[in-house]
Amino acid sequence: MKHPAIRQQSGMTMVVALVMLVLITLLAMTTFNLSKSSIQVVNNMQNRDEGIAASRSVLDEAMSSTRFFDTPNDALNQPCLNSNHRCFDLNGDGVVDIVTALSAAKCVKVRTIKTNELDFGVEEDRGCSVGSSADSGIVGANKGDSMCADSTWEMTATSQDQQVQSEVQMVQGVAMRVSTDNVETSCK
């Protein structure tokens, strides 16, 4: 004869085992989803960092010469696609991974340098001097301005990843000393 407590528990082990199996399955699925999300976050950060590096590279190239204000629509050497675009193949497979577009630089601010602000011990300042002025008191004569101006420019590079279509935009300020006759034509 079976004990009455055993008869009441028949099948209870199976129910407990099924509940535990469901809980373990839910735990495994949650862990899988969390790890998948973490990989996606890391992937997105890597794509962003690659876009930032590409944008910085293009901005550095453009800032290293005066082409960005002399020929603003053709500021890069050896562009891809069309002018002011640079293509990057990050993994060397022959396929363009990132395309970076450089917008034409915008002149933000110009300030003509006064002759008394120049330091003639500095080569850059010696080229700005006008010489002695004998036209004081003449209307429209030199007001103490040198032949140079400090200008501030804003440059924008936008990088787009061709595989995942992510986009990064960087804005960089550039200070440049220019001739005052260049300022009127390039900084409007």
Image (cartoon, rainbow, N blue to C red):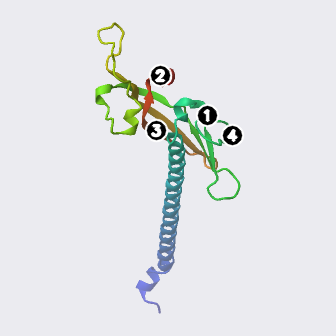
Instruction: Give x and y (percent) for residue 86.
Output: 62, 44
Q: Which residue is mark 1?
A: 74
Of the pair 119 and 75, the residue shown nearer to us: 119
Instruction: Give x and y (percent) for residue 45.
Output: 49, 54
Distance of label 3 from label 4 (alpha carbons) = 22 Å
Judged from the image, the secondary structure of the residue bearing numbered disc 4 is: loop
Earlier sequence position, callout 4 versus callout 1: 1
Dot in front, 2 or 3: 2
Is 165 situated left or right of 64 in this image?
right
Distance of label 2 from label 3 (alpha carbons) = 27 Å
Q: Which residue is mark 2?
A: 181
Dot in front, 1 or 2: 2
> Can the viewer see residue 88?
yes
Distance of label 2 from label 4 (alpha carbons) = 33 Å
Earlier sequence position, callout 3 versus callout 4: 4
Earlier sequence position, callout 1 versus callout 2: 1
Dot in front, 4 or 1: 1
Earlier sequence position, callout 2 versus callout 4: 4
Is 112 situated left or right of 21 in this image?
left
Judged from the image, the secondary structure of the residue bearing numbered disc 2 is: helix
Within 10 Å of the Cα at label 2, are there few (<14), some (14-19), or many (20+) other Cα atoms? few
166 up-or-down from 36: above or below: above
Cβ atoms at labels 1 and 2 below 8 Å apart = no
Of the pair 86 and 114, the residue shown nearer to us: 114
In the rendered structure, which amino acid carries the disc numbered 4?
Leu
Residue at 46% in and 83% down: 7
Earlier sequence position, callout 3 versus callout 1: 1
Cβ atoms at labels 3 and 4 below 8 Å apart = no
Q: Which residue is mark 4?
A: 81
